[in-house]
Image (cartoon, grey):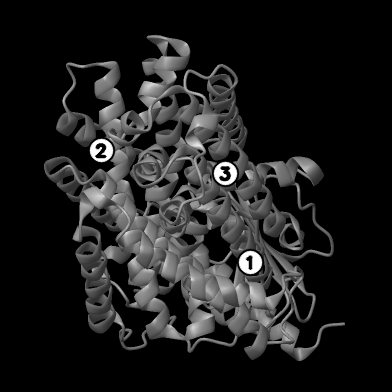
Amino acid sequence: MWTSEKRTYENVLQDFKDRFNGNPRAQKLVKDWNRIVLLDSTDTGSKFGLVVKDQVMVEVRPMCDFDEEADGVVHLQAEEDVLQEIFAGRYNPATALVDGALAVYSPDRDKVKLEALAMVIWRLG
Amino acid sequence: MKGAKELFFYVTVSCGMTLATSVFTMISGLFEITTGPGALVGIALAGFFCLIIALSIGELASMYPSAPAVRTYLKTAFGDRASLLLVYLYLISVVLVAGLESFIFSQVFHAAFPAATALPTIVILLCAITAVNLVGLELPRSVQMIATVGVVLFIAISGSLGFLSPRIPLTGQIGPVTPELLRSLPAAAGLAVFLYMGFEWVTPVGLRPSSYHWKVPISMAISVGVLIITFGVFVLGAASQLPRHIISSTPVPQVGYLTAIYGPTGVYLALALALAATVSTFNAGIMGGSRLIYLLAREGHFPEWCASLSLRTGAPVAAVLLLSSLALVSAIAVMAWGAALLVAVIGAAIICVLYAAFLLSALVLRKRRPDAPRPYRNRLWSPLQWFGVIALPLLGLQTLISEPSLGTRPVYGGALALILAALLTRVYGVPRPAGPGDKAPVPATQSFS
């Protein structure tokens, strides 16, 4: 059963998906970058996957289970509040990483790619 | 990658980050101030301190997994301004060491190809490293692991060969324990900390949350243990093959040593060693340093133009170019003034201070955030950590006045680095006004376990 809070968080993610798909620069940035960006909340336990395929964010889907070993998973872990702020464009992911509020488990290039996406989509910096 | 293989990967990353070509310059510096056995004791003492630091950083890494260690740990413990001073000092040491590393590579290359002069080699090397970083190329994990294992085994085996067939009896170098020998040990330990510089760069590399429960934290301690043995065996080998004054008279003692062991082929083996270090350590150093500059710029603590990213490759273009340019300037300065050892000594002193700050931050956060989740909690006796906090900066200071051939220049150099860091803190210590995406920092107390 969804609580209203969870619905808000999911709405933020859906809104992010629309922004992503409506931004040609973001799409250019993810050329040949097929990934599942896993959003893992440490406090609520919610898990969502942002599925990027062929330069399109094809879906935002709840993920009950996932394979940590799978290729192409970029794992983001933070409190749900923090993730919501990041994907609403109110908290720069680079700052969140430095603050220790966000953990990203991925190769360095994927971390930079996420940062670049934030810059393009939210016109940060 | 799971279990033992994953742990092995972290150990190789941690070891690989320390195995720069300039470690041999520091070994030369050690032989200038003490004998072979003295150098061995210095390496062991520095290794002991680094083990304490590694376990303390391990705890911090489990609190803030995947975070940029030098920025996050110091910021959360000491606040923005004090930590920035240390971060700028760290960046200065990165620039100095990058210049030193380029110069040392050019000297090894010159030994293999005498017609090659230093400046073109340095320029070509830095251009190649810059290009690799701009394109965003990364070595596959398996190649990184094999390269590091190869380098560690090669250094250890080469050291063993020299030690087992000595030309100079080691026993002859162990004289009476004189006050002079004892006086040289603190400086030797301070200098030897340089040999371990960078082992903590494994902290952002964890593949998954559970990696920070013990694998990443413990990998640093294992890595330091491996390095104590590797450098120790090499020093024993060198002291058994070459007179002390020969080792201390060159910034590339490994060339002479490997030639003594393997004959003329030794020069090319030294070059292969330098190439392996350049491909892994130096490249990763430029990559990590430029990421740090980029992050600081994003926070408003560095010029804004350093925060540009390539949308095609995702590389922090301006930061890479800035760091490479500064490394070139540093390398030219090292070359023009013959300042290899001077730069290494200043770098060692800075690292001693920074490692003390890491220890202190672990202690401060234990007090300030006692209930914050720590999937890995070190079992160190806290007075031992406090001893490190006090002793390491003193060792760093001692290091600055340790090399008779350098006179007071390291002291002036160290003071200059501190003044520069303070200036940067004054100019960029106040973050730019909040803009889109700049939410107020939240206390980082959540669990990542």
Q: Any mark on residue B61, and which?
A: 1
Label 3: how many Cα within 10 Å (few below 14, some 14–19, many 20+): many
Q: What residue type is labelled 3?
A: Cys
Residue situated furthest left in the rendering: B336
**Which residue is rendered at x = 65% and y = 79% of the image?**
A11
Q: Which of marks 2 and 1 is in front?
A: 2
Q: Are marks 2 and 1 in contact (CB under 8 Å)?
A: no
The residue drawn where x is 42% and y is 70% is B394
Residue B277 lies left or right of residue A81; in this view the side is: left
Name the amino acid type tagged 2.
Phe
Q: Do the residues labelled 1 and 3 touch (CB within 8 Å)?
A: no
Task: Look at discs 1 and 3 and give the one toward the viewer.
Answer: 3
- Identify the residue shown where x is 37% and y is 33%: B244
SS at mark 1 in the image:
helix
Query: Which is nearer the N-term, disc 2 or disc 1?
Result: 1
Residue B428 falls left or right of residue A117 = left
Q: Position of residue B240 (x, y in %)?
A: 49, 25
Q: How far apart are marks 2 and 3 (CA)?
A: 22 Å
Element type at marker 3? helix
Q: Of residues B173 and B112, which is closer to you in this image?
A: B173
**The N terminus of chain B sits in image quarter:** top right
Instruction: State the residue position of label 2.
Output: B103
Q: Residue at x 47, y 47 (%)?
A: B195
Write down the residue under mark 3: B15
